[in-house]
Amino acid sequence: MSTTEDSRARIKWVSQNHALVAYGDAKISVMAPGLTFAALVFEGFRAYWNEDQEELLIFRLDDHLKRLQFSMALLELDDPPSSEVLAQDILATLRANEFREDSYIRLQVYVDDWGSMTATSPTGSTVICRPRPRAAVFEAGQTFVTSSWTRNAENASPPRIKASANYLNSRLAGLEAKRQGAGGAVILNQNGTIAEGPGGCLFLMRDGVFLTPDVNSGILESITRQTILEMAGDLGIETAERPLGRTELYLAEEAFYCGTGQEIGPVTAFDGRPVGTGEPGPLTRRLQARFDDIVRGRHPGHGHWLTPVYNG
Ligand code: PMP
């Protein structure tokens, strides 16, 4: 059984419309605008198991819920659920499944039932939690290729919101990269500068400074990216947010891809050209180590980013 199948088999309960139901019983209408017109916004969260505290810690729950409120506002739902209600749904779902290991939570809010492209009700929501260990690329790194697809534009299908409709663009780039045997894609925006990858943001190091595309480069306002910028500041690692040219990929001394799913995944080559030595770099490793300490509650001063599931 693959890891995905294994974790699927372990999902007993999900939350749908703020009530726990058996996973197999959670259904949406085949005519729901959330499905027919992708009128759906979502969030992905990680929760980390802390063995010493025997506690599951959700990372930056409030910040993810705040971003979801922004995404929901753009969807113009009549009756968007509050962050308080959604936080309770997440806690209830994790507790019902009794996960005591690293887990992933997907929260989605959509237009349910039946309706036109501009339907704004009724609102449906689901919370699905599953065990999800750290990806192997955290250690090994992966190669990236530049996509021939252009990032969806702010004035067309805004990447700043986490809408499932945006992931067609990501999927096209991801499939192209996969055909080429690469782990990920660098997607350029309409200006020809670097936006992000299909499901995460990019950092490149030049002259010892970690550079990342600014928030107007066609990216999701990533919570991991923001965490890294803050962590780097604490570690005395210089960073800058600015438009990044494609050629800068090939000058990078170190690079990584980041997001809730991949956490911090070193990039070892762009378009077949090795990044630095072709091995994950030392400053990337330092950031990974600090990140791991923070998300597992081992680093002082970051407790406000962690929501305990069982003893909260
Ligand atoms: N960009 C895209 C397109 C994503 O799907 C994700 C994953 N949510 C990210 C960036 C990273 O965002 P975050 O760090 O908030 O998970």
Image (spheres, rainbow, N blue to C red):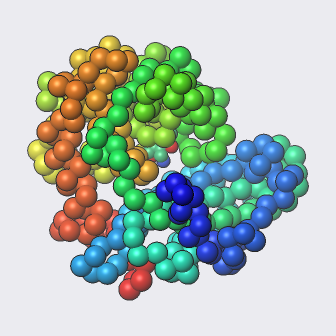
Give the total number of marks visible in the rendering.
0
Quick one: quadrant of the N terminus? bottom right
Residue visible at 43% across and 28% down in the picture: 182
Quadrant in which the C terminus appears: bottom left
Residue 82 in view (yes/no): no
Q: Residue furthest front?
A: 1
Where 213 sits versus 89, above or below? Answer: above
Report x, y in % for residue 283: 16, 40
Is residue 108 visible to us here?
yes
Res. 271 image quadrant: top left
* Residue sitting at the far bottom: 311
Q: Residue at x 87, y 52 (%)?
A: 31
The residue positioned 59% from the left and 54% from the top of the image is: 42
Residue with the most extreme left position: 236
Q: Is residue 203 left or right of residue 38?
A: left
Residue 167 in the image: state x and y as whole percent: 60, 38
In the figure, 3 relative to 179: above or below? below
Q: In the depicted view, which residue is nearer to us: 307 or 127? A: 127
Residue 230 horizontal side relative to residue 23, left or right: left
- Determine the image quadrant of residue 106: bottom right
Q: Nearer the viewer, residue 14 or 70?
A: 14
Q: Is residue 126 above or below residue 120?
A: below
Residue 8 lies, in percent from the top left, at 58, 63
Figure check: 27 above or below 84: above
